[in-house]
Amino acid sequence: MDERNLSILSAFKEAFGSEPSVWVRAPGRVDLMGSHTDYNLGYVLTLPISRDTVIAARPRTDGVVRLRSVAMGAEDSFPIDAIEPAKPGDWTSYVRGVAAVLKEEGYKLTGLDGVIDTTIPLRSGLSSSAALECAVAVLFRELGGWQMEPARMAQLCQRAENQYAGVNCGILDQFSSCAGQAGCALLLDCRDLSIRQVRLAPGMSIVICDTRAKRSLAGSEYDERRADCELGAKLMGVASLRDSSLEQLESYKGTLSDQVMRRCRFILEENARVLALAEALTAGNREAIKNLFAESFRGAAELYEITAPAMHAMIQAMNAAPGVIGARQAGAGFGGCMVALVEESCVVAFSKSVYAEYQKSTGTEPQIYAVDAVEGAGAIEF
């Protein structure tokens, strides 16, 4: 065991007086391209990252689930036979939601004692909630002795977040966490959930740049953006924006409001950028990567309006740093983390430069760290 897992073990012994018998993990994710395209049934280029949520647990025979969250400094307890919903957005809603959905689908659930630890910064756009959901689902699977395909698990965890956490998210976060492939980005088709592995050309690293500007999606402008896209698709007579084109969108000028036009344009252009970036990453085409990242951030700011002052300060610091190949937003926007592709030999210099420039311009200390692509959610063997 490494230092982190030894700390989790110690916390478990303190909380429950014995040792855990099952360990599971689920990674966070960063989208390299594809902001808000998932709920429009488009494409996303996503990377399951080496920041994860770990749960150490042991089964109980009385059907009660007891969990302690290290990050939240809080506990939750509920009986499987009578799962009461938690307050939407509270960390317990993700746990209870997954348990409730699995129960609705007829899966055998076992009571448990568990300690949750995460290295994913909360409310930062790296899918800490999806990682928690997927880790909980894997835990119930391991204790219950049943099997489930990653795509099915992702769909059920998404349903839990939609119905019990109050976030009308697409499939991206949960699918990334469940279906990750070590060393690869995933080109995800959000309509049929097919994936293609995309390997980055040698010499490039992924660096997360956390603005430390927290964000919350439940009941926020996220829902307004989704509603605009759905209205645009409806008025154009298509099932989703995936079925439209820029040419068709132009033909509806005057029919769609300016705001709906801008939202739809961003999604259609972003979808095309996802496919272009997949090719550029494999080929190591630095110039194409730079342009695609810049176009994505520009569209996020001007068309989809999901940026925040902290993000503009960060993009300036990232683009001015040594070794940067491309920089853009990550997740849903509105603050949180951003992502850069950086020359492997310049990661340290890049990180120091971004830290100094961002702190100077905002007075806030950012968090800058490189990540690797990792396997999806599963059990941990020691």
Image (tube, rainbow, N blue to C red):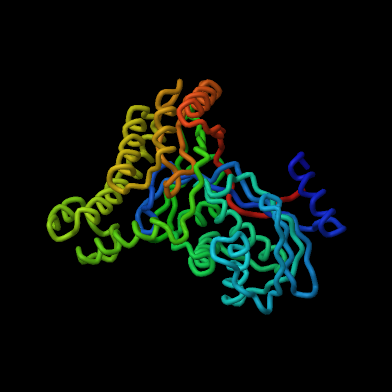
Could you say which quadrant of the image residue 119 lies in? top right
**Residue 135 x %, y %:** 63, 57
Residue at x 37%, y 51% (from the top left corner) = 43
Above or below, 62 relative to 116 = below
On screen, residue 320 versus residue 236, left or right, reads right
On screen, residue 349 versus residue 231, left or right, reads right
Residue at x 80%, y 54% (from the top left corner) = 12
Answer whether residue 197 is visible to the viewer in this image.
no
On screen, residue 136 versus residue 208, left or right, reads right
**Residue 192 x %, y %:** 40, 61
Could you say which quadrant of the image residue 113 lies in? bottom right
- The answer to which of 354 and 42 lies nearer the viewer is 354
Which residue occupies the extreme right position in the image? 17
Answer whether residue 336 is visible to the viewer in this image.
yes
**Residue 178 x %, y %:** 55, 55
Could you say which quadrant of the image residue 15 lies in? bottom right
- The answer to which of 359 and 248 lies nearer the viewer is 359
Above or below, 235 relative to 122 = below
**Residue 262 x %, y %:** 24, 50
Residue at x 43%, y 26% (from the top left corner) = 324
On screen, residue 364 versus residue 191, left or right, reads right
**In which quadrant is the N terminus drawn?**
top right
